[in-house]
Amino acid sequence: MGTLAAATPEGSSPPTAPRARSRQGWRRAWYRFSLNPTAVIGLAITLLVILIALAAPLIAPYPGSAGNFVDFANMLKPPSWTHLFGTDNAGRDMFSRVLFGFRISLLLVAVVLPIGVPIGVMIGLIAGYYGGWIEAVLMRITDIFLSVPALVMAMAITSVLTPNLFNAMIAVSMLWWTWHARLVHGITVSLKQEDYVDAARLMGAGPFHIMVREILPNALSAVLVKVTLDAGFVILIGAGLSFLGLGVQPPQADLGTMVAAGVNDLPTGWWESVFPGLAIVLAVLGFNLLGDGLRDLFDVDV
């Protein structure tokens, strides 16, 4: 007992204090987040979409409909208890195809953002910290990419390559870094003159240490909000490419491809386009509401 008391000097904090403070910080953050009902709804929708995408093979009533499957005896059946979203012009169950379509949309988000965001963040950090001709060159290149609409740029890239999911992900990834470069550049320019950055510089810290350890942590909240909002836009662009025939190709279950295929059967087969379109709206709405809630929580402007 005496040894334990001697090992912990009087007035010092126990080893678990930092973890306790961290838990309290997370509880306060969650409490503030929960005060925004739209943000909670957005989080619930996003988690629901992710859960559906992960469990699609288990909960889909006709998992074979997600692939190369034909049942002309049941083609263009309206919504019923047997087929909740009806069937398409090949007799495939639309409900099962929508569930699997969420997987393609979230896969696009999971690939594009981890590639594009780090590139944009590093370019923004370097341009904002060094300034001068480095800033001029990097930001002018960024402006060139920003001057072309994202969907148009993606269409140009995928039209040169073979239209498929992999090339669609490459196309969207090649243009998604620009917004994050612009965002982080502005934050870096405003933070690099702060006292704590000058103190780190006087203590001998190098540029890489200052950018990564001093400036970047203070920009992460804005980047996180931007990433959450971007997820919805990535889903929209991916669906747009598939709708135009430049993304995921049939018979693979993709929401944009299903909307495009259903256009040929309007208005009688309205369910072919309406339900995949509503699925796109649901996914995008969830990410947007979640991003708005995080923006209010962190009090940032992106």
Image (cartoon, rainbow, N blue to C red):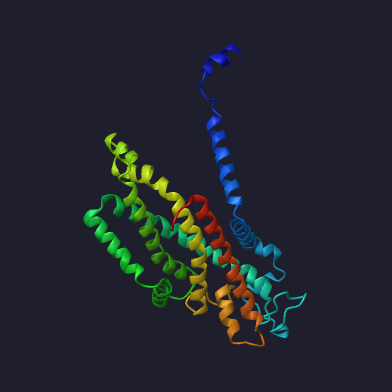
Q: In the rendered image, which quarter is residue 210 located in?
A: top left
Q: Tell me residue 246's x, y (percent).
A: 47, 77
Query: Which quarter of the rendering shows the N terminus?
Result: top right
Residue that sits furthest to the top in the current view: 2
Residue ID at (62%, 61%): 45
Residue that sits furthest to the left in the current view: 133
Name above or below for residue 100 compared with residue 202.
below
Query: Which quarter of the rendering shows the C terminus?
Result: bottom left
154 with respect to 87 (left or right):
left
Name above or below for residue 118 compared with residue 25.
below
Q: Tell me residue 230's x, y (percent).
A: 48, 62
**In this orientation, does residue 67 appear?**
no
Name above or below for residue 234 compared with residue 152.
above
Residue ID at (47%, 58%): 227
Residue that sits furthest to the right in the current view: 81
112 with respect to 89 (left or right):
left
Q: Tell me residue 84's x, y (percent).
A: 73, 74
**In this orientation, does residue 113 appear?**
yes
* Circle count: 0
Name above or below for residue 217 compared with residue 124.
above
Residue sitting nearer the eye, 114 or 136: 136
Q: In the rendered image, which quarter is residue 5 located in?
A: top right
Residue sitting nearer the eye, 128 or 118: 128
100 with respect to 113 (left or right):
right
Q: In the rendered image, which quarter is residue 68 located in?
A: bottom right
Residue ID at (52%, 32%): 18
